[in-house]
Amino acid sequence: MNIYNRPWKLVPNRVRGVGGREIDKLRGIDPPVDDNSGSESWIGSVTRAGAIGPNGGDSNHGCAEVILPDERKMYLFEAIALDPEAILGKAHYNRHGENLGVLIKYLDAKEPYLLQVHPTRPFAKKMWDSDFGKEESWYVIGLRDDVAEPPSLLLGFKEGVTRELVEKYYYSDDFKSLENLCHKIPGKVGETYFVGGGVPHALGEGCFVVEVQEPSDITVVPLRMSAMRKMFAPPPTKDGEQLPRPDFPEPSEEELKLYDERSLGAFIYDGCTESENLKRWLIPPKTIREGNWGKEYYLIGPEQTEYFSFSRADIKGGVSLIETGYPRVGIVLDGNGKITFDGGVLEIKKGDELFLPFNIPNAKVEGDLSLVLCYPEGSPNLIK
């Protein structure tokens, strides 16, 4: 059996945080629960998560596993290493090596996320020596109906916000005022938002989204080091002694200076009005193709970023997958069906997550289902 020319099923992969009930619902787990196994799921990930979280000591935390067509189970990065060019394709391998070049997640905000910002590629290279920044995007697929306030998200600075104003609240540990500098947008299922590097943002309580982003875990929360150390410190001992986190030691003056420079320098200070903010970041779908079988459309496409893209295909019947010369990751959001290809068939259903090697001859999706397909940097524009 040639395992490289077939679709692979991914193993569900929960990552850090408390929550996950909405992820369970999507996957058909009964009863769905919020617990500490993770409010996020990293789908098809070969990216390692940062240390913060219940599994921070696991060196492969964040990395997804896969079930190969010959029934072997291993990390996806291990499977790719079996024959990277045969799995990823020459064009992708020459560009990214064995890195998938994109990271996909479910984010289930049982609790509101902290206001944060991610670096642009140039700033990430300068400050972290990283080849990737962290442009990202949100596709809202659910909203909890049992939260205190209607779910919303923070995205983008309001008009007139300056670095001096952000520094004022940052150095006074006034996190609430920093949040109030941002636009608050009501959550709506089916909407897609692009979150550019340098743009402040946070998911509010109750939002459930698919996040597609650069394959990086660089996140900046505009809290001073002293506040961060306090927030993520272990619980006090029985004697009341507060122990430091072993991976968060007392910083030097040089480290504090670098921390502040990263925290304040990662933002791009170009706030705007509410209407202009939505024009910038709320992305309407754009049709790729349609027919009697259904419709496929970009949620985020090349017009928004060169670093990744993703589409949604609503299928009733059957349609061939577009050949791109690059690998991709798929999520079955609803329904059920199958992928047929030369040499086999793979049954798929709501909640399944898929890794699709670059060359699956005559691959066709059949059934009544909705499929999200995520493409790495380098994939061609699918609109002809």
Image: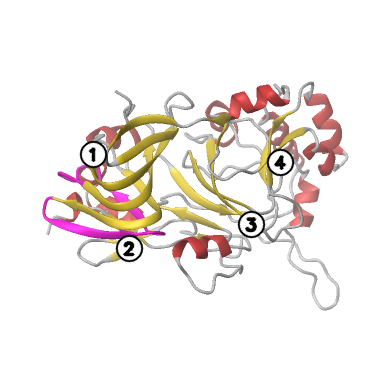
Which mark is nearer the camera, 1 or 4? Answer: 1
Q: How is the image coloured?
A: secondary structure
Q: Visible in this render: residue 272? A: yes
Residue drawn where x is 32% and y is 29% of the image: 382
Asked if the magenta segment contains residue 260, the reply would be: no
Q: Earlier in the sequence, mark 4 or mark 2?
A: 2
Which mark is nearer the camera, 4 or 3? Answer: 3
Q: Amino acid at mark 2?
A: Met
Q: Earlier in the sequence, mark 3 or mark 1?
A: 1
Give coordinates of residue 180: x percent, y percent. Answer: 81, 37
Determine which residue is flagged by label 2. Answer: 74
Mark 1 residue element? loop
Residues at discs 4 and 3 in contact (Cβ within 8 Å): no
Determine which residue is flagged by label 1. Answer: 89
Residue drawn where x is 53% and y is 34% of the image: 133
Q: Which residues are magenta?
A: 342-363
Quick one: which residue is furthest to the bottom in this view?
238
Asked if the magenta segment contains residue 357, the reply would be: yes
Instruction: Bin the neighbour count of mark 1 within 10 Å (Cα to Cα): few under 14, some 14-19, many 20 and up.
Output: some
Q: Visible in this render: residue 378? A: no
Mark 4 residue element? helix
Mark 3 residue element? loop
Image quadrant in which the N terminus is located: bottom left
Determine which residue is flagged by label 4. Answer: 255
Determine which residue is flagged by label 3. Answer: 144
**Alpha-carbon distance for marks 3 and 2?**
34 Å
- Please say if 25 is above or below 256: below
Give coordinates of residue 74: x percent, y percent. Answer: 32, 63
Mark 2 residue element? strand
Q: Earlier in the sequence, mark 3 or mark 2?
A: 2
